[in-house]
Amino acid sequence: MRQNIGIYQKGEYVAKRGGLHTKEYKLWFAMLTRCYSNTYKEKEPSYINCMVSENFKNFQFFARWCNRQVGFNLEDFQLDKDILVKGNKVYSEETCCFVPRQINNLFTLSKRARGDLPIGVYKDDTGRSAKLYKAVCKTLEDKNQKSLGRFHTIGEAFSAYKTCKESVIKQAAEIWRENIDPRVYQALVSYVVEVTD
């Protein structure tokens, strides 16, 4: 990571307490690493072109912001940059929020696994079905992808995925409604899956 990206200065919030890094510091350091470490981006290319706002580069500002957010002090909630603003590449106070891991995991795109096909669509390479496409979608109940069937066209397969995924996201919004930022709830219930995702 390039030096002097983050500004750590003494103040109300500290990097360590009782010999252990604080939650605020771990989040801040991880955010800077994702955006500015070339080694990290080689392993996780989805973070190429990501950046941190000037305010968030300042540890005291970031830590203060964290402590004012819905979900920050809840177990298994994660910092997210692209649920409020789809496709966002900037970590900032306007674009970030805390969401439960279950919700965050709904937005994993798996571009490497699917290749050039739309999200949720895979070429069916099994025997007689070799000319078909399959659609899969992870539901809240399933740890693995659930098959939605086999289709003759990419468009049909994507349509099945889109319907399922939007339903799952809305279901998660209702389950977590009482514990998430109202902005997150609104983003989830109005989320549209697009073929370009």
Image (tube, rainbow, N blue to C red):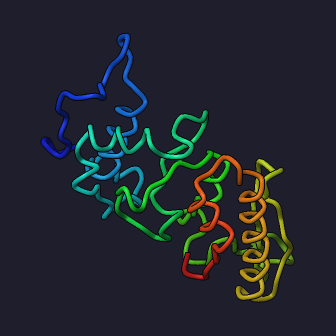
Q: Indicate the position of residue 100 as horizontal and vertical percent values.
A: 62, 46
Q: Indicate the position of residue 185 as horizontal and vertical percent values.
A: 64, 61
Q: Indicate the position of residue 2 as horizontal and vertical percent values.
A: 16, 45
The answer to whether residue 153 is left or right of residue 75 is right
Where's the N terminus, which quadrant? top left
Instruction: In this rendered view, identify the residue nearer to me: 85 or 10.
Output: 10
Instruction: In this rendered view, identify the residue nearer to me: 67 or 193.
Output: 67
Q: Residue furthest top?
A: 18
User: Residue 3 lies in what quarter of the image?
Assistant: top left
Q: Residue furthest left?
A: 4
Residue 139's place in the image compared with 189, above or below, is above
The answer to whether residue 79 is left or right of residue 34 is right
The answer to whether residue 103 is left or right of residue 82 is right
Residue 66's place in the image compared with 75, above or below, is below
Where's the C terminus, which quadrant? bottom right
Instruction: Give the mark count.
Output: 0
Give the residue drawn at x 27%, y 47%: 37
Give the residue drawn at x 76%, y 58%: 174
Instruction: In this rendered view, identify the residue nearer to me: 23 or 195.
Output: 23
Give the residue drawn at x 79%, y 71%: 164
Give the residue drawn at x 46%, y 70%: 87
Residue 136's place in the image compared with 154, above or below, is above
Residue 147's place in the image compared with 159, above or below, is above
Instruction: In this rendered view, identify the residue nearer to me: 152 or 129.
Output: 152
Q: Indicate the position of residue 10 as horizontal and vertical percent values.
A: 19, 27
